[in-house]
Amino acid sequence: MPLSTGGTIAISPSMVSEDILSTLRQNKVTLVIGVPRLFAAIRGGMMDKIRKKAIARFLFNIAQKVDTLRFSRFIFGSVQRKFGGNIRYLVSGGAALDTDVARDLRTVGFEVLEGYGMTEAAPMITFTRPGRVKIGSPGEALYCTKIEIRDGEIVVSGLNVMKGYLDKPEETADVIRDNWLYTGDLGYIDEKGFLYITGRKKEIIVLSNGKNINPVEIEDQLLKTHPVVKEVGVFRMAIV
C-alpha cells in the first residue's frame, strides 16, 4: 500500500523507545502501525511523565473534558513534536486495544484507528474511518463485507471471505455455512453500525446453574486493579 501511493516504509531497528522516536523524527512518519502492546508502552511512558508535573496533569484533565483532537494537539504540541510532529494516525491491530490506552492517546492528540479481521477474511472485516472513531470499537464493516450477529456470534459474508480450507472439508464445514463465515468471536453491532467484540465463543464458561460467564470481562477488570498485575487467566475449576 505505501509503495502504491508513493509512501515510504520506515522500520525501527528495535523496540527501544529512543530508537522508535528517532525513526519517527528522521523519517517524518505520518502513520504508525503496531500492536496494542506498542501503544500501551507509548501511553505508559507519557502518563508517567504527565503524573510527575502538576501543570501537565492540569492540562490533561482539561483536554479530557474538552475532548477534541484540535484542542489536544494544540496544548500538547510538545508531545506531538517529540514524535516527529507529523503523525496523523496510529493504527492498532492484532488484538483489541485497551480502551484506557486509546482514550489517553486521544487526550494528548493522537487519533487511534483500529481494525478487526482474520486470515479467513483476507484479512480485514472492519476498520475505523478517520474522523469516525468510537473508542472500544474496531470500526464499521468494509464496503465489500456484510456482518451479522447470530446467537451472539459475529458472522461475515463478502468477496473477501475464503471459500474454504484446502483439502479440509470438515474444518471448512465448521466455519463456512451458506457462504457465511462463523468467526467464533462474540460481539454486537450498535445502532450506527459499529462493531464491538466481547469475547470468544469457545472461552465462555457455563456454570452448573446454566449461567454463561465471559472470562475476558473478568480478566480485563482484574488487570486494572493494580499495576503489578501483568497477566490474568480466568478458568473454571472442578469442584470435588
Image (cartoon, grey):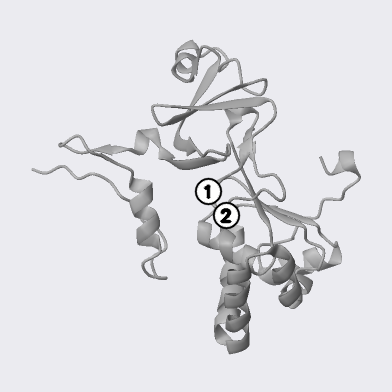
User: Which picture quadrant has residue 156?
Assistant: top right
Give the camera-side residue of 136 and 238.
Answer: 136
Give the camera-side residue of 3 and 92.
Answer: 92
User: Which picture quadrant has residue 15?
Assistant: bottom right
Left or right of 122, for residue 152: left
Task: Look at the picture and state if 177 lies above or below 219.
Answer: above
Task: Look at the picture and state if 6 lies above or below 226.
Answer: above
Residue named by callout 2 = 36
The circle drawn on residue 117 is none
Q: Are marks 1 and 2 in contact (CB under 8 Å)?
A: yes
Please, what secondary structure does the residue beneath circle 2 have?
A: helix
Q: Where is residue 34 drawn, in percent x and y?
A: 65, 53
Instruction: Identify the residue shown where x is 56% and y is 57%.
Output: 37
Q: Where is residue 228 drawn, in percent x and y?
A: 39, 70
The circle drawn on residue 96 is 1
Task: Look at the picture and state if 65 lies above or below 138.
Answer: below
Q: Where is residue 97 drawn, in percent x and y?
A: 55, 53
**The disc labelled 2 sits on which kind of residue?**
Pro
Q: Where the N terminus falls, by quadrant?
A: top right
Residue lying farthest to the bottom in this orientation: 54
Please, what secondary structure does the residue beneath circle 1 have?
A: loop
Query: Reading the chain from its start, which is encountered first: label 1 or label 2?
Result: 2
Q: How many marks?
A: 2
Q: Where is residue 240 drawn, in percent x and y?
A: 8, 43
Instruction: Identify the residue shown where x is 40% and y is 64%.
Output: 224
- Marks 1 and 2, how far apart in space? 7 Å
Instruction: Identify the residue shown where x is 56% and y is 16%.
Output: 164
Task: Look at the picture and state if 1 lies above or below 176.
Answer: below
User: Which picture quadrant has residue 10?
Assistant: bottom right
**The disc labelled 1 sits on which kind of residue?**
Ala
Instruction: Identify the residue shown where x is 54% and y is 46%.
Output: 95
